[in-house]
Image (cartoon, rainbow, N blue to C red):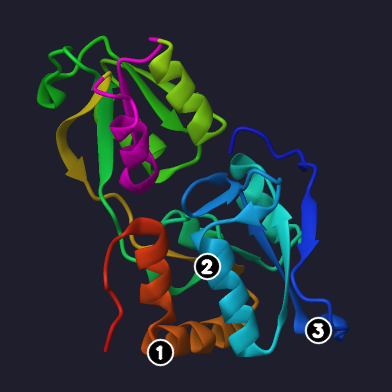
Amino acid sequence: MKRLVLSTVLAISMLAAPVMASDTIRLGTEGAYAPYNYLDDSGKIAGYEIDLGNAICKKAGLTCEWVVNEWDSIIPNLIAGNYDAIMAGMSTTDERKKTINFSDEYYPVAPSLYAAAAGHKIDLSALKGKRIGVQGATVQAGYAKKHYGENNTILSFDSFDQAVADLMAGNLDILLADGDPLVPVVEGSKGAFVFIGEGVRIGGGIAIGVRQKDVELTQKLNAALAALKRDGTVDKLIKKYFNNGPFYAN
C-alpha cells in the first residue's frame, strides 16, 4: 500500500428497517472499478458487487451498509475496523492471505490483459525500456514488478481510471490490468488502442475479504453466497454486468 491514511468514506444504508447493530454489515468497496463497483451518474454506488452484496445480505438476514474507500488503503482499513468485509474486485492471493481471510469466490479468475497504442510493435517476451502502467497494490502491480521491473519502468497509479488516462495521454507504452474493465476501454477507443500478446491469469478468483478473526461472519457469507449460486442469482448478475458465464449453474 502506498499510504495508510484513512480515506473519507461514504456510508450508504441499503435497507430502512431498523435492526440490531449485530445484524448490520459494513462492506468496503472502491467505487471506481466498473463493472465490479462504481458511482453511477447520480453518484450512487452501483455495479456487480453492489447488487451481489445486497443479495448476500438479504439472504443472510443482514443489513448492508456500503463504505467507499480508496483502493490502496482498503485492506488496512478493514483490519482497523472501519468496515467488516471487502467487495472490491479483489483477487485471492497468498500474500493477501497473510493478513486477511477470503470467502468462497464469486467471480472466477479472469485473464489480465495488455493494452497499447495501435501501431506500436511490442514484444512482451523481450520488453526493455518500456513504461508499464498498473494500478497500485493490485496483482498486476506485483506481476509487472517481478517480470518486467528490471529492464522497464513500472508506473503505479491510485486508480484504474488514472492509469487509463495516462495511457491515452501517451505517458505509458503498455497498460496491464484486469480484462473486464479494460475491454470496454479498448473497444471504445475506435482503434486507437489494441490488446497485445496473450492474457495472463494472476492470482485466484474474486472473493470477499474478511478479518482473520471473523470466522462466524465468513461462514455466514459463504452460506448465503452458496445459496445464491444454487438459485442462479450469481450467474444472472454475471450475465448482466459481464455478458459472461454461466459459471456456477448446477
Task: Give neighbour class at mark 3: few <14, some 14-19, many 20+ (Cα, 10 Å).
Answer: few
Distance (Cα) linking label 1 and label 3 = 27 Å
Nearer to the camera, 169 or 215: 169
**Left or right: where 229 falls relative to 33:** left
Q: What amino acid is found at the position of numbered circle 3 in the picture? A: Ser
Q: Would residue 182 be counted in the magenta stretch?
A: yes
Q: What amino acid is found at the position of numbered circle 2 in the picture? A: Ile
Residue occupied by mark 1: 231
Q: What amino acid is found at the position of numbered circle 1 in the picture? A: Asp
Badge 3 element = helix
Which residue sits at x=40%, y=64%? 240
Is mark 1 in CB contact (under 8 Å) with mark 2? no
Question: What's the magenta region?
Answer: 170-191
**Left or right: where 77 falls relative to 216:** right
Q: Position of residue 149 (x, y in %)?
A: 32, 23
Identify the disc placed on residue 22.
Answer: 3
Distance (Cα) linking label 1 and label 2 = 20 Å
Which residue sits at x=65%, y=78%? 214
